Amino acid sequence: MSTTDFDLVVVGGGPGGYVAALRAAQLKLSVAVVEASHLGGICLNWGCIPTKALLRASEINHLLHDLGQFGFAVDNPRFDFQKVVGRSRAVSKQLSGGVGHLLKKAKVPVFDGFAKLAGTDGKKRKVEVALKDGKSITLTAKNVILATGARARTLPGLEPDGKFVWSYREALVPDELPKRLLVIGSGAIGTEFASFYRNMGSEVTLVEVADRVLPVEDEEISDLARKAFEKQGMKVLTGAKLGTLKKSDKDVSVEIEAAGKKETFTFDRVISAVGIVGNVENIGLEGTKIVVDRTHIVTDDLCRTGEPGVFAIGDVAGAPWLAHKASHEAVMCVEAIAGKHVHPIDVTKIPGCTYCRPQVASVGYTEARAKEAGHEVRVGRFPFIGNGKAIAMGEPEGLVKVVFDAKTGELLGAHMIGAEVTEMIQGYVIARSGELTEAELKETIFPHPTISESMHEAVLAAYDGALHF
C-alpha cells in the first residue's frame, strides 16, 4: 500500500462504505477504504445478517413444535443453543470475508484503523489513520465519504453491563437462553429479538413508550402485530413507563406502569432497543463546516455536507437507518462525484422490513400520513385467509393493505404483515418507483398459487372489489 493519494477515501466499510468503494472502482476512480473494526459494518457483523440467521433457527424451532397441523409428530424436539448462536456468527464471518474478497478483487486497498478528517493539502482532503498496528498514515483525496455508521442509543439506567442489560451486541451472543426476558423498545430491533427469544422458549415482555408497537408502521399493521405477539405468549405493554432497574446477583426487577396500572416484574435479562446514535465523535468534524443534528451529519439530497469535498451516507447521515438505503446512497454519491447524472433519493420509495414473526414490510405513506398530506384516499385490504398458498403453507394470518390517491390513482403506500412479506414488498416498491397507478396494477398478472396474489387482490379491493374475499 505504497500509494496514499486517491480520488476518493471512504471512511467505514459497512453496506454504505464498501459499496461506495466498489462502485468507485467500477468507474475507474482510485479509491481506498478505512475500516476500524470489521468489513461489512454493523449490518453483516452485528445487525441484519446475524439476526436473520438467529430468526431462521427460531422459525425452525417454532415449526418443530407445530408439526401436528401438517400430519407429523416429533418427540421431544430440542436444540443446542450455543450451536444456534455459533451458526449465526459463522454466517456473519463468511459474508464479512466475502466483502474483503470483493474489495481485493476490485483492487481497493483497505486500511485497518480509525480515520479522521485532518484538513486540506492544497485542493485535496487529508485523512489521518491511526492503524491497528500502532502506526499512523495520512491519506489524501479529492473527495471523502463518511460512512461511519451508528451504534445503540443508551439511556440512563439502561446502560449495557454485559450481564443483565444487553444491547443488540450482547443479545446476539448470549451464554444461555434467558427464561424471563424484558425487551424495551418495539421497533424493528426490539420486535425481532422478542420474536427470536420467544420462539426459542423465553418468556418475553415487550415494552413500548408509544401507544402501539412498531409505531412507524400503519396503525392497522401495528394492531395486527400486537395481536400476533400476544397470541404467541408475549406480554405487550404500550404507553409504558419504566422505573429504575434493581439488580440482584441473579436477576433484575423493575416497576412498569402501563394502562394506569403499576406492577413490578422480575427478569433474567433485559434488552435495550431504544434507537441508535450516529458515530460522529473523533472523526475530525471540529473546525469544518459540517453540521451535526442530534448525532447525525446534515447533508443535502446528494449526500454533500457543508464541507466541500466531504460527503456522508448511511446511518451517520440520519434516518431511515437501513442498510439498503446506505448502499443506494453510496452508488448515487459516487456517481455524482464521477460526474454522472443522478436522481436524489425519495425516502417514500424506500421499503422498510421487520423480520419478526409475523413479518412486516411497508413502503410509502401510511393511511394516516397520506390524509395528513392532503390526499383523498382509496384503501384496499386483503387478508391471507383468502389466499390459497398461505392456507396451504399453514400461514393464514396476514394482511396486505394499499393506499391510493383517489383522484390520480397513484399508489401512495403499501403495508403488509404475514409470511414472506419482506420478499413481496419489492413489487410495490417497483410500482412506486415506476409511478404506476391502479390501472397498471389491476392489469398485472400474478402467478398462482402464490402469496403475492394477495397484493393483486388488495389493489382490486380498493377499486372494483377483491375476487376471493
Image: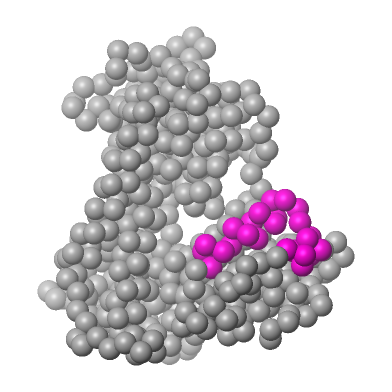
| Image side of residue 220 versus residue 294, left or right | right
Q: Quadrant of the C terminus?
A: bottom right
Numbered marks: total: 0
List x then y, in percent, for residue 153: 39, 56
Going 31% across and 87% down the picture, which residue do you hit?
72
List x then y, in percent, for residue 70: 38, 86
Relative to 451, residue 144 above or below: above
Q: Nearer the viewer, residue 4 or 184?
A: 4
Q: Nearer the viewer, residue 313 or 465?
A: 465
Relative to 443, residue 224 above or below: below
Going 73% across and 63% down the picture, which residue do you hit?
444
- The residue segment tinted magenta is 421-444
List x then y, in percent, for residue 130: 27, 26
Q: Nearer the viewer, residue 258 or 398?
A: 398
| Image side of residue 412 versus residue 219, left or right | right
Say if the magenta span includes residue 434.
yes
